Each structure stands twice: as C-alpha cells, then as structure tokens.
Amino acid sequence: MEVHDNIVILDCGSQYTQLIARRIRELSVHSEILPWDSDAEEVLRRNPKGIVVSGGPRSCIEPDAPRLDERLLRSGIPLLGICYGMQMLAHQLGGRVERAGAAEYGRARVERASETSALLEGLPASLQVWMSHWDQVTGLPPGARAVAVSEGGALAGFEMGDGRIGALQFHPEVAHTEQGTEILRRFLFRICGCDPTWRLEDWIDRTVEEIREKVGAERVLCGLSGGVDSTVAAVLTARALGDQLQCLFVDNGLLRKDEADQVMDTYRVLDLSVHRVDAGGRFLGALAGVTDPEAKRKAIGWTFVEVFEDVAGGLGGAAWLLQGTLYPDVIESGHQGKGASVIKSHHNVGGLPEIMKMKVLEPLRDLFKDEVRQIGRLLGIPEVFVARQPFPGPGLAVRCLGEVVEPRLALLREADAIFREEIAAAGLYNQLWQAFCVLLPTRSVGVMGDVRTYAETAVLRAVESQDGMTADWARLPYDLLDRTARRICNEVPGINRVTLDITGKPPSTIEWE
C-alpha cells in the first residue's frame, strides 16, 4: 500500500481547524486532525512530515490552557503555529504573551519584517490577512526573529533559527488572507519537504481494500437517503463487496415533497439492490410530544436503527450498518478530544443507540463534503446525486421547530417546495450550499381577503459554503424573495408570514436544530 506524506494538525478549538486540513489536502498532501492533548507517541505514530498547531478560544497564559507536548518541540519535526498556536509556541519557547489593549478581528494588514523568512520571503511586502485574537506576543523567544508585524505595530509572525519552527498571528487558511495558500505551500514543500502525492483516486483503491479486509464475508446493510453521502458510501462499498451489500431506503415521513418516489426512481440508474420501507407512522410516533432538538435527533437515531434491525433479518441478516458519516459530522458531535464541545448530535454519529447489534461501517468519516462529491464523480455516479444539496439525516424534523406532527410537516413541505422551485428557476441551485424553509412554532396575526388570520411563520434559509463548517447567508435577488414570499402565503393555507434568515455560521449553525 502506497504511503503518503502526512501533516498532523493539533486542534486547540479553532472554528478554522477543518479549513486548515482542507487547504492542505487541496495542495495534494494528506492531513489529519488530532486533539491538542494527544500524547506525543500518538502524534509521532502518524509519521508527520510537519505539525500545525491551530488557533483556539483560550489564552495560553492561563494555567490550564492547551500546551504542546514538549517531546514534539524537541522532535525536530517542522512546526507551524497559527493564531493561538503562535502564542502557545512563543510562551513555551520562552517568549512573552500578554493580553492586548484591544482585540484584532477580521481583515487587517501586515508588513514583512525580515528579508529571510521561510514562510514569507518573496511575497509582497504588505498583505491583507484575517485576524481573530486578543492576546499578543510582546516578547520574542530567545533565538527567534520577527517576520511580520501588523499595521498597529504588533508582532504578526516569527521564526526560529532555520525556520523549521514558524508562527503566524493571522490565518493563512482563510480565503480573506492574501497569499494564504502560497504560505501553506511554502510550509509543506519548502520547510517540511512533502511530496504532493495525495490523490482521491488512490484513496478509492485503498478504501475498497480496507472495506474488504474489515468486513470479510459478512453482510452489510446501508440506509440510503438519496443524498450524496449515503449514495457515495453505497456505491463505494458495492465496488468492494458486490452482493454482500443490501441497501434500504426508509421513507420516514420526514422527507420533502414527493422525495421518496423521486429518490427510488433515480436509484434505478445505479447498480444497487434497494429495498423500500414505509415507516412514517413509526417515526412520527417516536417524535410525538418531543420538542427539544437533541431529543428529536436521538429519537430518530433510535428509530432508524430499530427499523434497520427489524428489516435486516428479512433481508438475510447483516452484521454491519453502512453510514455516510463525514468529518464535519464527527467534529460537530464532539468526538475530537477532551473538552470538545458538542454543537449538535448527528443521527448517524451521536444518536446511535449504544445497544445497537450491528457494527458500524463509516468509510467516508475522514472526508469533507467536497471530497465526497469528487469521489462520487470518480465512481461514475450521476450528477443528480453528486450535486444534490445536503439534507439532514433527521429530515424535516429539525426544520419543523416545536412538535413534529403531520399537518405542520405538510405546510413545511409545500413552502419548501416553492422556495426550491424558485431557486432552481433562477439558476441558483448549484451556486448555493443549501436553500430550504423552516417552520417556526410561532403564529402571528395577518389579513388575507379582508379576513383576519392567525397562522404559522416560515423562514427562508439560503447559505453559501465550501464544506459546511463555516457559511455565509446568500444575498438572493429581491424579486426572487418577493415571488417566494407571495407564493407561499397565497398557495399554502396555514402560513401568513415569511421571514429571511441572514445569519452566518458562526454564530449560527446552518440548520436551526
């Protein structure tokens, strides 16, 4: 099996950690993320050509703040500290870190401060960058030299000796930083000596072999949703196991308008054995009276597994449950080291019952959404699947705020269908990460045809993103929004108000629950 150069990213809690990993992979070098408190032996076992220390929300001068294992500092492996990572390195190497008089957030300018910098030499003398910090390095470690300063005169970068240890106060992984990709390129190829050999084609071949080795002669059951993740996971596993894979499409009663029939029609073009189960009543029963978002996700997770296990026996039995879990699912479910924050449980990660009898197979769990789309195309999956916007595993249950009952789901389906129809007619579908409606558990007074109404409220949500880890709200044309709002109020009895969600991620998540 071919071995690729590897970069380990030690996560100190930054919202941009996943973005660092993606940027490195885009440069054809494999990267993986470990918690900051990983034992040095665990890090070194990954044979890293370099280590990146991410940003984070803490202050490195706090007694219990994240620290780098001293053995890694002495290992000779190139290190790059970003934001908090710079402060951590400065502090541990004998420099001085203090709380600044004012924070630096957002766009800023930095000036190169040295003609000899492994990271910055040859780049423009002045760069626009992205900052996100309060503490600052006020004293260089012994033997270090400044390589960049901010427009306010604060230290924005330093390097030690031959440049094998470098640090930046700004974020090169963020698109707002000019030459950010070039800076990462220099770290990977000039400092770490990596070879750009990470290719998704190789990943497919390697993963097919790993699936065969792990599963052996046992049978696998896959819950297909119609989305890109489960579809790619199924086609990949079918390539590895053939008829050992049985696919199950569960109509959970939480899908969008006409979606169940459309999905089954589309799956006929793929060489997959798919069995459909109508279980809407079972899921709605499990959700009766449930309004808490986490409780919804867990109830759906339990019910999915119960359905899978009930059906598996009739399909010849299965030892494995195949899921399309992705890297962001794992991270958001808080599976990355002690102290990690659980943003929300995912029905295919945090919501699975511990007593589940089947073993879980998750071949995509280390990949980002854009990588999964690329793999889908390499596997020959039609674009109708590959380009499909993400749809949450719990379906409309997490877009129907409050209690999930069929009459409210019917309102949401109709409103959502109108919004997506207008998005498609405007030619914007493939430009958006997601576009959907949310139904609020709030009624308001309206007037229609000179008659007072007291009806539900729909929210339009459309975002642009690269990987779902961060997102910006989409600036949709006013005429599109106007048509959508008028159509929903006119064509969906029971909704008399339409609002627009204009928050990004962060501070919000893309889904409301």
Image (cartoon, rainbow, N blue to C red):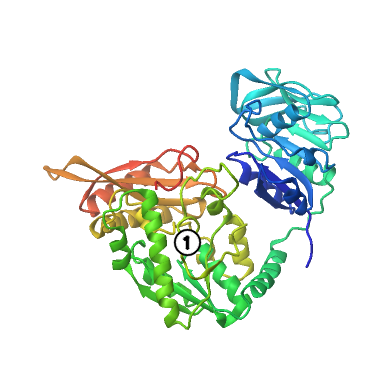
* Residue 167 x %, y %: 75, 33
Q: Which residue is mark 1?
A: 354
Nearest the eye: 146 or 201: 146
Quick check: 397 left or right of 321? left
**Does any portion of residue 268 appear in the rendered image?**
yes
Residue in front for this viewpoint, 39 or 119:
39
The residue located at (36%, 46%) in the rendering is: 460
Q: Residue at x 72, y 51 (%)?
A: 42
Residue 34 x/y as whole percent: 66, 48
Q: Is residue 181 visible?
A: no
Vertical placement of residue 505 versus 241, above or below: above
Secondary structure of the residue carrying numbered label 1: loop
Q: In which quadrant is the N terminus drawn? A: bottom right
- The amino acid type, in three-letter code, at marker 1 is Glu
Q: Is residue 139 above or below residue 431?
A: above
Residue 353 quadrant = bottom left
Quadrant housing residue 256: bottom left
Image side of residue 414 versus residue 26, left or right: left
Disc 1 crowd, CA 10 A, few/some/many (<14, 14-19, 20+) = few
